[in-house]
DNA sequence: ACTTTGACTTCGG
DNA sequence: TCCGAAGCCAAAG
């Protein structure tokens, strides 16, 4: 699971970004945005700077936030105020990186 | 086994 | 746009 999430993150190409929620979903664990965050903190060697909060907002604080923004701009990602331009730079995942999307039997995602 | 803890998200005011 | 509350889920202690 940590693996699946790590893989998903590694799939984000340079110059593109994604969100915690989107990554979680792409990895096969919808609604597990927080776990994506944990993986980023735990595992290194990942393009952590390409992961943003919903709407392209930076969820980090202090220097990390500044550094993240700096790195992204260096890759060509443009910011509008405090947000990254998601319409342009959000990476679209094709499918869950590992086998069955479902590992813990959860519903397909009916929503309401 | 139970409680706490997040680099989260969405909604309402 | 900013702030607070509630929902979420697995890992840690």
Image (tube, coloured by chain):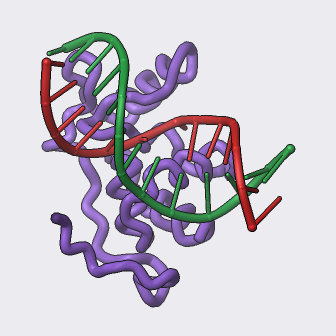
Chain colours: A purple, B red, C green
Q: Which residue sits at x=55%, y=14%? A: A62
Q: In this view, does A111 lie to the left or right of A18?
A: left
Q: In this view, does B7 lie above or below A92?
A: above
The N terminus of chain A - image quarter: bottom right
In the image shown, does A35 or A85 lie closer to the viewer? Answer: A35
The C terminus of chain A - image quarter: bottom left
Q: In this view, does A69 lie to the left or right of A91?
A: right
In the image shown, does A108 or A43 lie closer to the viewer? Answer: A108
User: Residue farthest to the bottom?
Assistant: A100
Q: Which residue sits at x=32%, y=47%? A: A16
Q: Is residue A60 above or below residue A96?
A: above
Q: Which residue sits at x=19%, y=21%? A: A80
Q: Which residue sits at x=32%, y=77%? A: A95
Q: Position of residue A15 (x, y in %)?
A: 34, 44
Q: Where is residue A67 in the image (x, y as percent from the top left)?
A: 52, 22
Total numbered labels placed on residues in the image:
0
Q: In this view, does A31 lie above or below A94?
A: above
Q: Position of residue B6 (x, y in %)?
A: 58, 35
């Amino acid at each position: 699971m940590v693996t699946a999430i790590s893989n998903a993150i590694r799939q984000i190409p340079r110059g593109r970004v994604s969100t915690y929620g989107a990554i979680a979903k792409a990895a096969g664990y919808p609604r597990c945005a927080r776990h994506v965050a944990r993986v980023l903190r735990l595992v290194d060697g990942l393009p952590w700077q390409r992961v943003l909060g919903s709407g392209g907002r930076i969820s980090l604080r202090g220097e990390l936030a500044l550094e993240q923004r700096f790195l992204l701009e260096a890759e060509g990602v443009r910011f509008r105020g405090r947000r990254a331009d998601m319409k342009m730079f959000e990476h679209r995942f094709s499918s869950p990186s590992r086998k069955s999307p479902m590992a813990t039997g959860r519903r397909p995602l009916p929503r309401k």
